[in-house]
Amino acid sequence: MKNLLQINASLFANNGQSSRLADAFVAEWQRAVPEGSVTVRDIGAEPVPHLTAERFGAFLAKPEDRTPEQKAVAGFSDALIQELRDADVIVLGLPMYNFGVPSSLKAYFDHVARAGVTFRYTENGPEGLLKGKKVYVFAARGGQYAGTPLDTQTSFVRDFLRFIGMDDVEFVYAEGLALGENSKQAALAQAQAAIARLLEPVRQAA
């Protein structure tokens, strides 16, 4: 059975445009894969705590030496990582805030990037351990940034996912959402068309 993990990062929860695009994709994916399961992790509505020295120390401590507080921190991280392990497909709703990713997403990344758990260092460099997954990223932006130096999101997200083993990543952009109603509707229509294209091979394989 296929498992899909949806991660929404919008401050506006389900009302954010990135969340709406991710929801639209997931709804169609469920129709194409009716036996599949979906898990939703809304880090906008329920933020992951930002990394601190104390939280990082919990990751580094040996399991048998962890205090109760450290066990709770490590257990929370383990649960996030297990959701990723269990997923065959990952869908990320990604808004742009002040030219970057939401701080909640950075905090999430900081809790799932753990040496010896989701990646390891080898004599040939780092190796990601969460392999064999398909990732779809739905990026919603008020302005036009794709393909320009101001698009810091795409390279950062792609590089991070590759670092933990996920190198099969598709980006769908909805840009110019704050540049007037015509621009907004055109961008959303283009994103919906991209969703249809991405789902076609999923339907064929179902």
Image (cartoon, rainbow, N blue to C red):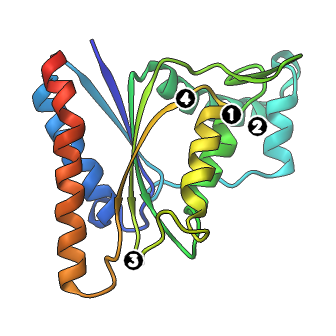
The reply to whether callout 4 and callout 2 are in contact (CB within 8 Å) is no
Q: Which residue is mark 4?
A: 166
Q: Which residue is mark 3?
A: 142
Q: Which residue is mark 2?
A: 69
Please tell me whether residue 187 is drawn above or below residue 83 in the rendered image: below
Residue 67 shows up from this direction: no
- Mark 2: few, some, or many residues within 10 Å (few <14, many ≥20)? few
Q: Secondary structure at mark 1?
A: helix
Outermost residue, top side: 1
x 29%, y 17%: residue? 2
- Would residue 155 be found to the left or right of residue 54 on screen? left
Q: Could you give the CA–CA distance between mark 4 and mark 3, rounded to whole angstroms?
A: 27 Å
Q: Secondary structure at mark 3?
A: loop
Q: Could you give the CA–CA distance between mark 4 and mark 1, rounded to whole angstroms?
A: 27 Å
Looking at the picture, how far across and down is residue 155, in whole percent?
Answer: 60, 51
Q: Which residue is mark 1?
A: 72
Looking at the picture, how far across and down is residue 76, in whole percent?
Answer: 61, 34
Where residue 197 sits, quadrant-wise, is top left
